[in-house]
Image (cartoon, rainbow, N blue to C red):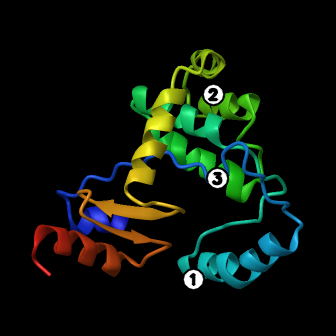
């Protein structure tokens, strides 16, 4: 994403919430065949190619609270930092990002007011924002992550090389 913004400075990246397995959809078992196979055949090779550290997390939490926390961080002007920290916590350290204590500690690590985040999560202040994002995703036909939507006119799904993202932007502009 950073490469795309460097190449296309007028492009604005807006991250939206999308729960892969919202209630009542069952979460996956980390030691189960599906995740073990997906990670060994797809995730680990891709992470290695991209030079990204990723480990199969030992827990598959519900993520709605993490998305609510990200909306809270956006209101603090720290979405990018918080979002990156949630990803590191989950994919590098295997932390349960569905746990309020974990989410609050990530805020604290970034110098944010963890008590304010705890209150926002307790009162579900940003739950409707998360649900609104998910309704919009559904209206656009998004069924998985990552998904890239350009100006609500064109989309790509799955991990994409920056060249494909540039082509998506050009297509929406009518250039390519």
Image location (x, y in percent) of residue 49: 57, 83
Image location (x, y in percent) of residue 122: 66, 18
Q: Which residue is mark 2?
A: 108
Image location (x, y in percent) of residue 93: 76, 53
Report crowding for label 1: few under 14, some 14 to 19, many 20 or more residues within 10 A (C-alpha): few
Task: Tell me what residue is drawn at x 32 percent, y 73 percent.
Answer: 165
Q: Quadrant of the C terminus?
A: bottom left
Q: Which residue is mark 3?
A: 88
**Rounded to the nearest whole Å, what is the CA distance between mark 3 and mark 1?**
18 Å
Q: Is residue 1 visible?
A: no
Q: Is residue 147 left or right of residue 168?
A: right
Q: Which residue is mark 1?
A: 49
**Rounded to the nearest whole Å, what is the CA distance between mark 2 and mark 3?**
15 Å
Local secondary structure at mark 2: helix
Task: Tell me what residue is drawn at x 44 percent, y 37 percent.
Answer: 132
Q: Does label 2 or label 1 sit earlier along the sequence? A: 1
Local secondary structure at mark 3: helix
Q: Quadrant of the N terminus?
A: bottom left
Viewer-nearest residue: 8 or 140 = 140
Q: Is residue 164 left or right of residue 97?
A: left
Looking at the rendering, which quadrant does residue 140 occupy? bottom left
Task: Tell me what residue is drawn at x 17 percent, y 57 percent.
Answer: 10
């Amino acid at each position: 994403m950073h490469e795309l913004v460097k190449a296309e400075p007028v492009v604005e990246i807006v991250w939206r919430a999308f729960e892969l397995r919202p209630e009542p959809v069952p979460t996956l078992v980390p030691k189960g065949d599906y995740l073990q196979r997906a990670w060994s055949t797809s995730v680990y090779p891709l992470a290695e190619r991209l030079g990204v550290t990723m480990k199969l997390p030992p827990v598959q939490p519900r993520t709605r609270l993490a998305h609510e926390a990200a909306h809270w961080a956006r209101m603090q002007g720290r979405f990018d930092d918080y979002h990156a920290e949630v990803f590191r916590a989950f994919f590098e350290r295997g932390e349960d990002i569905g746990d309020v204590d974990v989410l609050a500690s990530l805020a604290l690590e970034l110098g944010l007011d963890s008590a304010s985040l705890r209150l926002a999560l307790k009162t579900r202040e940003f739950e409707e924002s998360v649900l609104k994002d998910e309704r919009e995703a559904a209206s656009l036909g998004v069924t998985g992550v990552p998904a890239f939507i350009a100006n609500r006119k064109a989309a790509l799904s799955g991990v994409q090389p920056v060249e494909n993202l540039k082509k998506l932007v050009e297509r929406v502009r009518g250039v390519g």
